[in-house]
Image (tube, grey):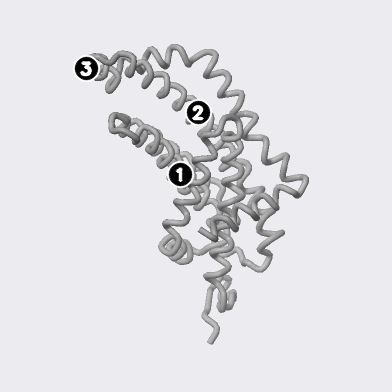
Amino acid sequence: MTDIVLALGRSLRTLGRGRVWLLFFGPAVVALLVWIALMVFGLESLIASLIEQPPMTWLAAWGVPWLAKLGAVLGGWLLILAAAFVTAMLLAAIFVMPLLLDHVALADYPELARLGKDSMVAGAWNSVAAVLLYIVGSLLTLPLWLIPGLGLLLPILWMAWLTRRTFAFDALTVHATDQEWRELRRQDSLPLLLLGVTLALLAHIPLLGLLTPTLAALAYSHFCLEGLRRLRQGALVAVINEQPQIEEVK
């Protein structure tokens, strides 16, 4: 938990550097426009569509149509929020994350050698694949919303998973080798997800939530690069036959 607080604190400190604000607000502004457009043109029809689908039809058949209507309204709002969040997530991951990562790495972790693969295509594909899995998983687990409490818990867990899957990969793909990435994922699997849960909770705060994808880019950059720095502590970085190597210092 200390590492999560440290990463978030360093992210806020990074926001104190003027030019970062231009990157910070960009995805949120675009996502806000998407959110407004969906509310104006799509909310009513979305609610009408949801109320005709299970599990809302089951609730109506059980004699609680008011609960079905409430579930459809809540589902409509959550889907629109998720659409706006996903838009901001993709924009932040594909266009903003590489710029923020360069800034954070140079300013706060200049000693970390770049031993990974600098591939924008790989990062973009990871982000798109994560979003597709997020959408499919969210739809497949909709019937579980009938279980008390899961209607609130599942969106947070899915959003946390999406945030971790997207930004943890992007934060390390340039600096970490495949072996280092596997080791960090093994060591910090739970903290990486808990950081995603923290950010997912922030994402459900109106308006502020649209800023969380860029905050996630900063937080995962700090968390992952700090983890990589600890992993390499006591190691010597060398270049042998033009291939980066990590050797333990005896």
Q: In the structure shown, which secondary structural element does the residue marked by tag 1 occupy?
A: helix
Residue annotated with mark 3: 62
Residue 51 location in percent, x, y?
A: 34, 15
Taking the image as shown, residue 76 lies to the left or right of residue 94, namely left
The residue at 58%/63% (across/down) is 226
Residue annotated with mark 2: 81
Q: In the structure shown, which secondary structural element does the residue marked by tag 2 occupy?
A: helix
Residue 134 location in percent, x, y?
A: 40, 37
Residue annotated with mark 1: 160
> Of the residues under marks 1 and 2, which one precedes in the sequence?
2
Observer-side mark, 3 or 2, equals 3
> Of the residues under marks 3 and 2, which one precedes in the sequence?
3
The three-letter amino acid code for the residue at tag 1 is Ala
Vertical comparison of 104 with 244: above or below: above
Vertical comparison of 128 with 169: above or below: above
Seen from the viewer's position, the closer of residues 206 and 24 is 206
Seen from the viewer's position, the closer of residues 224 and 2 is 2
Residue 41 location in percent, x, y?
A: 52, 13
The three-letter amino acid code for the residue at tag 2 is Leu
The three-letter amino acid code for the residue at tag 3 is Trp
**Are discs 1 and 2 less than 8 Å apart at CB?**
no
The residue at 49%/44% (across/down) is 163
Seen from the viewer's position, the closer of residues 29 and 125 is 29
Identity of the residue furthest to the right in this view: 18
